[in-house]
């Protein structure tokens, strides 16, 4: 296996912090599809490498036998097949590298958007689009920011159980923090990533109840609808998205809900 392929495969042996921006369902699907494609390429490369090894052993055995016309033809066919397999492995290596770059670009974009949403809260600003938002709010302290980022760090490396524990501790320690509503949102999102959709719904409903004026409510409603779809509750998901669109028609989450409703059966 080439050094290029080995390096590309090493990148994808690391844990992925999926769903860096929980409301973006299109990006969720794209990242999942990329991951599946990469895994398929890895399996295909493993099979090709194993086959190449078997052919190489056959060639060595044939080369030690007495030469004959049929044997010579067989050797040539095997050599040609080896050349083709090496070419396919190289093509797969290039595809893995390209998929790696596309996936990294998606994560950078999602992370940037997530930070745009959270930085105003950390700085003490209130989303002007949030119902009942005040003109200003107290800033988050350094201790709050460190505790919040520690929980985020667990989520970003895919340790969703650790993230849930961290965000819960954050809310317990800093219940009045300007970041508490986001912490509650990420608890629900982490449950979603663990495919624990019932707890995801319960967590997002808790956010809506505890922080009704939060700018996170539209994303929470969309996450609830996504969880309901995963549970096979299409009618409930449709109701959740209709409610989201009615309450927050100009939000990005509402736009995503409109697109999803058009394809929901």
Image: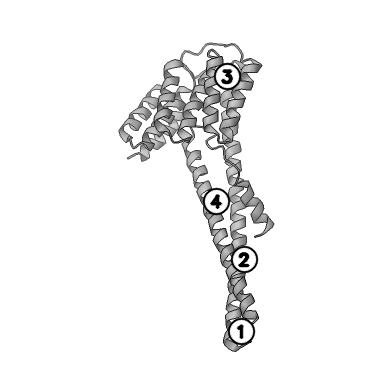
Residue located at (55% from left, 36% from top): 158
Identify the element where label 3 is drawn: helix
Q: Circle 2 sits in a helix, a strand or a loop, which is it?
A: helix
User: Foreground: 167 or 240?
Assistant: 167
Q: Quadrant of the N terminus?
A: bottom right
Q: Residues within 10 Å of mark 4 (few under 14, many from 20)?
A: many
Using the numbered discs, state the Cα–Cα distance from disc 1 to disc 2 in whole angstroms: 21 Å
Q: Position of residue 81 (x, y in %)?
A: 58, 72
Earlier residue among tags 1 and 2: 1
Label of residue 108 in the image = none
Q: Quadrant of the C terminus?
A: top left
* CA gap, disc 4 and disc 1: 38 Å
Of the residues under marks 4 and 1, which one precedes in the sequence? 4
Snapshot quadrant of residue 135 = top right
CA separation in Å, label 4 and label 2? 18 Å
Q: Position of residue 204 (x, y in %)?
A: 43, 24
Quarter of the figure with residue 232: top left
The residue labelled by disc 2 is 86
Q: Which residue is mark 3?
A: 121
Q: Do the numbered discs 4 and 1 sit on residues whose CB atoms are within 8 Å?
A: no
Q: Residue at label 1?
A: 72
Tell me the quarter of the picture where residue 14 sits: top right
Residue 234 lies left or right of residue 27; in this view the side is left
Q: Position of residue 182 (x, y in %)?
A: 52, 22
From the image, state whether disc 3 or disc 4 is nearer to you. Answer: 4
């Amino acid at each position: 296996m080439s050094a290029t392929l080995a390096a590309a495969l090493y990148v994808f042996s690391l844990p992925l912090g999926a769903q860096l921006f929980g409301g973006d369902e299109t990006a969720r699907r794209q990242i999942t599809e990329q991951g599946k494609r990469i895994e398929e390429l890895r399996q295909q490369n493993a099979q090709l490498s194993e086959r190449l090894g078997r052919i190489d052993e056959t060639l060595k055995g044939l080369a030690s036998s007495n030469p004959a016309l049929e044997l010579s033809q067989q050797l040539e066919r095997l050599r040609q097949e080896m050349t083709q397999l090496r070419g396919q492995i190289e093509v797969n290596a290039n595809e893995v590298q390209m998929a790696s770059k596309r996936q990294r670009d998606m994560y950078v974009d999602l992370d940037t958007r997530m930070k745009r949403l959270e930085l105003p809260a950390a700085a003490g600003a209130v989303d002007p689009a949030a119902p009942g938002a005040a003109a200003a709010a107290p800033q988050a302290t350094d201790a709050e920011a460190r505790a919040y980022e520690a929980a985020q760090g667990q989520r970003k490396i895919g340790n969703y159980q650790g993230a849930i524990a961290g965000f819960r501790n954050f809310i317990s320690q800093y219940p009045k923090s300007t970041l508490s509503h986001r912490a509650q949102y990420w608890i629900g999102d982490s449950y979603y990533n663990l495919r624990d959709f019932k707890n995801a719904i319960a967590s997002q409903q808790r956010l809506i109840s505890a922080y009704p004026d939060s700018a996170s409510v539209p994303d929470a409603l969309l996450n609830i609808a996504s969880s309901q779809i995963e549970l096979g509750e299409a009618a409930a998901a449709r109701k959740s998205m209709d409610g989201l669109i009615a309450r927050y028609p100009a939000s990005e989450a509402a736009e995503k809900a409109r697109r999803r409703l058009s394809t929901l059966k």
